[in-house]
Amino acid sequence: MMISKNEVKYIQSLCHKKQRQQDGLFIAEGPKIVEELLHSNYTIRKLFAVKEWLAANPLQSIDTTEIGTAELERISSLQTPNQVLALVQAKAATEPELKGRLGLVLDGIQDPGNLGTIIRIADWFGIREIICSADTAELYNPKVVQSTMGSFIRVNVWYGDVKVLLDANKNLPVYGTLLQGKSIYTIDKPKEGLLIIGNEGRGIREDIISYIQHPITIPRIGGAESLNAAVATGIVLSHFV
């Protein structure tokens, strides 16, 4: 069975946030992510895959279309398309559970690659809750999904008013990455709390800074002006967890 022109057009339309949110679907590509989705509680609505992938992964209950490499290139958003593309049902995030654990708060992380990498880093360190401001990149952006390498399946990514959430959790210690802060190498590992990571350019917003009880910093030794947000998150978590 061939892929139709309408299907090609529709898949391409899912690269746009408006269409994804309207239909509650997103794109996932490549054997690694699709395999993880197949073993998760996400629902795959449709699969498009090359003959070799389908031969190695016989599927009974999923609507599947065999396509050639040239067709895969037409519908893929990757520079190098990789065997299989899935249309997946989006899931609403659950209210974050923060007591007794460490959660991340992302204040305006707008680069999809950064967000995806932060989710992957969170998964590596066992962080289960990420709270995102409304202007943080969208979870189901294809670049975010791809950058997570499947970690979005295991991490609850919730969007909402960060200040309302911080107000509701005043009993939790709040850490924030600032240039003037205590060295991460000298603080005790928190058993619970929130770690705020700011926007790639402007850092943490002024009205969010007031919530930070424990300003922390990664001591600079060389001459770099700043650190990538995802890199900074990884360094801090490696000393927090």
Image: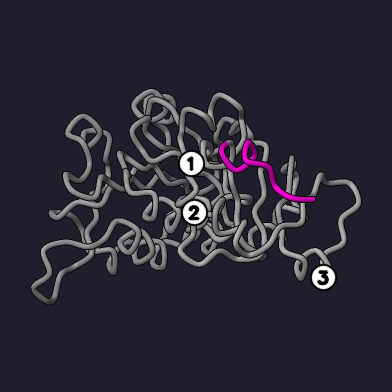
Side of 102 relative to 57 (left or right)? left
The residue that disc 3 covers is: 56
Which residue is nearer to you in this view: 236 or 157? 157
SS under mark 2: loop
Three-letter residue code for mark 3:
Ala
In the image, the segment drawn in magenta is 1-9
Instruction: State whether residue 178 is above or below residue 94.
Output: below
Structural crowding at the residue carrying mark 2, measured as other residues with C-alpha within 10 Å and reported as few (<14), some (14–19) or many (≥20): some
Side of 39 relative to 237 (left or right)? right
Three-letter residue code for mark 1:
Cys
The residue that disc 1 covers is: 15
Which residue is nearer to you in this view: 14 or 101? 14
Of the two numbered discs 3 and 1 on the same chain, state the one appearing first in sequence: 1
CB under 8 Å between discs 2 and 3: no
Residue 118 location (% of width, % of height): 42, 55
Residue that sits furthest to the bottom in the current view = 222
Q: Quadrant of residue 26?
A: top right
The CA span between labels 2 and 3 is: 23 Å
Residue that sits furthest to the right in the current view = 60
Q: Indicate yes or no whether the magenta region holds residue 2.
A: yes
In the image, what residue occupies the spot 74% across and 40% down? 45
SS under mark 3: helix
SS under mark 1: loop
The residue that disc 2 covers is: 77
In the image, what residue occupies the spot 8% across and 73% down? 223
CB under 8 Å between discs 1 and 2: yes
Residue 97 location (% of width, % of height): 57, 37
Q: Quadrant of residue 171?
A: top left
